[in-house]
Amino acid sequence: MLPIDVPAAPNGPLADELRADAELQTVHAELLGMDPSGRRFAAVLRDTIDQLLNGEVTGRYAWESLYKTERTHAGTLVEINLQREFTFADGATMDYQVAGVEVDCKYSQTFGSWMIPPEARGHLCLLVWASDNDSRWSAGLLRVREEWLNQGSNRDAKMTVKARHRDKILWLWRDAELPENVLLHMDPSDRAAVFAPQSGQQRLNELFRRVQKRRISRNVVRTVARQKDYMKRVRGNGGSRSALKPEGIIIMGDYDSHRAVAEQLGLLPPREGEFVSVRVARRGPQHRNARHVTLQDEAWVVATPGDLSDIAPSLPTHTR
């Protein structure tokens, strides 16, 4: 589960005012009821950014590589993908109806730069922010009041929330963890080595060799492989699992049996659509206090730099 930072409720007159807004409280409770952990919301944001990057076709992994028109389109995609995930009804005047209440959705990649149209005055806005560079995101609700807004100077008169009035936002999740874009955050020299080979298979092998003990998303695999059959390139029978087995590296996927191996080794288990690679070694006297897992009737531990390379064991049969 992603660690979600749910902010404390405001105190004093502001808290009384927010509590008195029945529609605000109703929508807030409805959204939290649909996604108590924020995991679904975070997944939509991760998938939307990946959709924009389109790594399988473009090889891109950084927000800055998007064209201006693509960045402008991000808000529309967030709005659409949230509606698909949570099946919000269409609004009559705003984007959605949530628990029968009209709600507009505004996304910004820069915190605080939500562009609010004049027709949203008096309505609730779902304000969403996500930063791939920071691996963080936030979402909250605001009752739009003109006195809380900076007047727009653009031709469509869109406005932003005054910094001193951001305390009027009733947060659902604040500064929560966005699933990591590994390619963006890995060491630049390692990233260059991953992308150096001409072969998609060799690039994937290098990815799992250099990015160990970290969750690697399916989209990262797709971006590195840049091939339609990218999942085949991970598996055994000629994929990265076979290629890296002589080096002692195992690659765990999102199967229950693989997650159990990761947990027994003290690693973060892969979530849906993720992989975790690690070099392992047969347990010896020097690993007395190390966590271990039994594979093929032998005890295995996470290898230390001083351990010689063993041929990696096969992972358990896939189960979910």
Image (cartoon, rainbow, N blue to C red):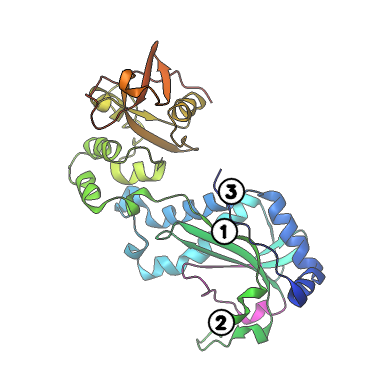
Where residue 114 appears, x then y in whole percent?
Answer: 54, 73
Q: Quadrant of residue 203?
A: top left
Residues under labels 3 and 2: Cα distance?
29 Å
Q: Earlier in the sequence, mark 3 or mark 2?
A: 3
Instruction: Tell me: residue 91, above or below residue 36.
Output: below
Residue type beneath disc 1: Ile
The boundaries of the magenta stretch are: 104-122
Quadrant, the N terminus: top right
Q: Quadrant of residue 265?
A: top left
Which residue is situated farthest in the top direction here? 297
Q: In the image shown, does 136 or 71 lie closer to the viewer?
A: 136
> Pointer 2: residues within 10 angstroms few (<14), some, or many (20+)?
some
- Is-magenta flag for residue 105? yes
Q: Which residue is mark 1?
A: 80
Relative to residue 158, is residue 225 drawn left or right? left
Regarding residue 226, the answer to whether it shows in the image is no
Q: Could you say which disc has been placed on residue 40 in the image?
A: 3
